[in-house]
Amino acid sequence: MPDPRLRLVSVLVGFARTLRAAGVGADHERTQSFLAALERLDPARERDVYWAGRLTLCASPDDLPRYDRCFAAYFTGARAGPRSPRLIVTVTRFTATPSGGRGEQDPDPNVLPATASAVEVLRNRDIARMTAAERDEVHRLLALLRASREMRRSRRLAPSHGGILDPRRTVREAIRRGGEPARLYYRDRRQKPRRVVMLADVSGSMAAYADALLRFAHALVRSEPRATEVFTVGTRLTRVTGELRHRDPAVAMDAASKAIPDWSGGTRLGEELRELLKLADARGAVVVIASDGWERGDPGLLAAQMARLARMAHRVVWVNPHKGDPGYQPLTAGMRAALPYVDELVAGHSLAAFEELADRLGGLRHA
């Protein structure tokens, strides 16, 4: 069994690493101060961890909002508040000198005066066309993504202000008051997050998007660990839910990459869907299939398994990165076979598309 103290240190260091990824000045020296402070406090108390980190890991007042969002995402399941404010970049055109030369600070005479949000540019850019630095920034934003969940009514009843009369509690209270029915008590069905089963295509045709898809899946697992299942599909079906349960995105992605044996291979969606329906309970769940639909197996088998899935699932959402292209048409054999059984076909090519998908899983609808 691993040493509980080493496990705790790993979790706390992972939190500091997450803060650094979000731009907070939580360097090595501040991380050591954070660990030293918690040796004098109780790490099991959320309040102690919060204030120890806030007082040691933040380097300036500008770090405080980012610290609060990261703390919520890392320790309490991504129940962060509003998204971070957009970063405003100002580009100014300087006038030319009378002699016809450039002004002292004029780097380019063709630059027009403009203000733009760097985050907004990244939100809508296709991940496959990004530079390595831009992808790293998108990965940081995905780590802070709020992935809420659509709620459903459970079969179990709980005390409520209205609903079904609870005769047992009502009579028991009346007996306690000497037989006078002073108050009526009620019960109603509990609200539970609806389960999500996600399949992420890691085949060669999806190589440019597979990493971002798994990071989105990590946000889903982190927000509702007991109501999320994640599988990768390629030449075989691989369950990676356990690997993605680690709070630290870097550790989770490293564990998932080691568990997936078929990166950049082919795709046999029909066979893997048949295997999924044997391994995972999709009944009443929202099933998210992230794939471009390049099926190397039998399209007829894929259609049959999609029909079975559509009868079991609450909703089937197909995420296709190419859907973000205005001229996209679902012409591949796999997409044509699956489309009749899909409730929603959405894009999955950018950070904005992932944010919209998270809203859909939370019960929101976009026009």
Image (cartoon, rainbow, N blue to C red):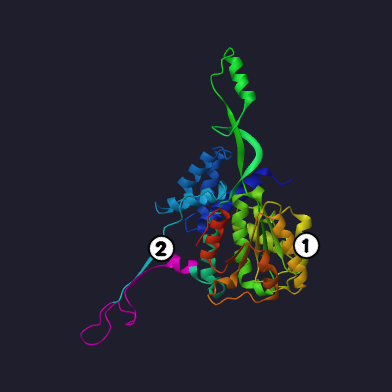
Q: Position of residue 179 (x, y in %)?
A: 59, 13
Query: Looking at this view, is 363 or 46 the one in front?
Result: 363
- Magenta residues: mostly which secondary structure? loop
Q: Earlier in the sequence, mark 1 or mark 2?
A: 2
Residue 8 versus residue 143 in the image, above or below:
above
Q: Nearer the viewer, residue 166 or 242?
A: 166
Q: Using the image, tell me which numbered label, if any, was put on residue 16.
A: none
Q: Is residue 236 visible?
A: no
What residue does disc 1 label?
A: 274
Q: Amino acid at mark 1?
A: Arg
Tell me residue 7's x, y (percent). Answer: 65, 47
Inspect the magenta stretch and tell me whether residue 327 lies in it.
Answer: no
Residue 103 covered by magenta stretch? yes
Amino acid type of disc 2? Leu
Task: Say which element carries label 2.
Answer: loop
Kindly state the secondary structure of the residue where label 1 is placed. Answer: helix
Disc 2: which residue: 87
Q: In terms of image quadrants, where is residue 322?
A: bottom right
Q: Nearer the viewer, mark 1 or mark 2?
A: 1
Q: Left of 53 or right of it: where is 167?
A: right
Give me the residue at 44% from left, 56% from top.
84
Above or below: residue 324 compared with residue 23: below
In the image, the segment drawn in magenta is 94-123
Q: Is residue 253 visible?
A: yes
From the top left corner, tell me how far across and down residue 195 is, in percent: 65, 51
The crowd level at tag 2 (other Cα within 10 Å; few <14, some 14-19, many 20+) is: few
